[in-house]
Image: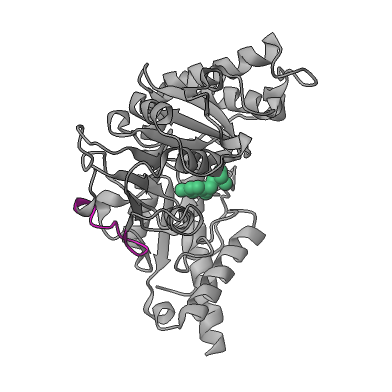
Amino acid sequence: MTTTVAKPDLRPANPNFSSGPCAKRPGWTPECLADAPLGRSHRAKIGKTKLEQAIALTREVLEVPADYRIGIVPASDTGAVEMALWSLLGERGVDMVAWESFGSGWVTDVVKQLKLADVRTIEAGYGKLPDLTKIDFDRDVVFTWNGTTSGVRVPSGDFIPADRKGLTICDATSAAFAQRLDFAKLDVVTFSWQKALGGEGAHGMLILSPRAVARLESYKPAWPLPKIFRLTSGGKLIEGIFKGETINTPSMLCVEDYLDALKWAKAIGGLDALVDRADANFAVLDRFTAKSGWLANLAVDPATRSNTSVCLTIVDPDVTALDKDGQAAFAKGFVSALEKEGVAYDIGAYRDAPPGLRIWCGATVETSDLEALLPWLDWAFAQQKATLKAAA
Ligand SMILES: Cc1ncc(COP(=O)(O)O)c(C=O)c1O
């Protein structure tokens, strides 16, 4: 690898490669929000209709089965996952499956906050999936479809039996709208608007299978539930939540933005088109990685490599010879050089993950922008390497 790489001429038209909030959809402008019913009640017909539309379009674009409930809930994906954990767990033992920071966060919640007696944790470190054959689906199971901070995803829902006795609770926030979720195998699916469709933070989606609803109506947790988590009343599901009667007040500006994103998704061809765009973006980055000689995908098994939150490590021997702090400093210098040039924002690895890069490849990212970024990666690497040599 030469240390004299000329500064590229072309810059990405959109330098937003963050893994959340993610890039807005191509063509987005604030004018897209002009139809938001601002200053009106979300319970008025105009607001309620928007919320109902958001639910209906979510079902259509994500291809959610007709008998699954879809609700808009507070506190983004975290809110949706917490509602599920606190409302459903405790009826039987639970297997917590985690392989990166967010999954580990759910383990902490269940072990240290809910303090459930019968918990098994099935874990793997960054870059790997745990042994999924160890999961006992007669128990409840909590897992993340796509680990955003390691770029490792489950390849499919094939590891989940159709005739399970427990519930599967899946944090799908960085998978939804980019990877096909096997709804028949999932009892709870959560995601937030700020991820793959480039929406805004603060609102989460909670999707429940009929079996999850049956659990809610037959089991009452031993602990108190704050109003913000409550999905039942008098032992019955609060159906209104799944018809746009939100628990508390949503931002109608964010709702309008989500509707805009969903309409764009539908117009370009729905879920197939979204998955294809993310796959095409990933392929571009993956080809570059394979040829680079200095980058590698953190996900060891190619079948588990994310097409959204692509995590890359710097494998150049001069860099791997550094200690962890040295590697982190190298990656930090790399990322800030690109930020200063205005060619890539927010592409550093997550704070708890191994040092490196994380480049979002979801459907709202244009392939041409990713292609324009690639020569800059070589440029930044050469710059950093020259700095390293000069300091040696
Ligand atoms: C897998 C996963 N779970 C949960 C979260 C938290 O999402 P939010 O901030 O939308 O609540 C994130 C955010 O990146 C995530 O990637």
Residue 104 place in picture, x, y as percent: 43, 58
Magenta stretch bounds: 121-133
**Image quadrant containing the N terminus:** bottom left
Q: Is residue 298 left or right of residue 157?
A: right
Please say whether residue 128 is one of the residues in the magenta stretch.
Answer: yes
At 73% from the left edge and 17% from the top edge, which residue is drawn? 37
Most common secondary structure along the magenta stretch = loop
At 26% from the left edge and 40% from the top edge, which residue is drawn? 156
Q: Nearer the viewer, residue 341 or 104?
A: 104
| Vertical side of 229 occupied by 130: above or below | below
Residue 53 shows in the view: yes
Residue 299 place in picture, x, y as percent: 33, 58
Q: Nearer the viewer, residue 295 or 231?
A: 231
Residue 288 place in picture, x, y as percent: 37, 55
Residue 19 shows in the view: no
Q: Is residue 272 left or right of residue 74?
A: left
> Which of the 4 image quadrants contains residue 117?
bottom left
At 42% from the left edge and 56% from the top edge, which residue is drawn? 107
Q: Nearer the viewer, residue 387 or 65?
A: 65
Q: How is the image coloured?
A: one colour
**Which residue sits furthest bottom?**
392
**Which residue sits furthest top?**
45
Number of marks: 0
> Which of the 4 image quadrants contains residue 119?
bottom left
Please say whether residue 250 is one of the residues in the magenta stretch.
Answer: no
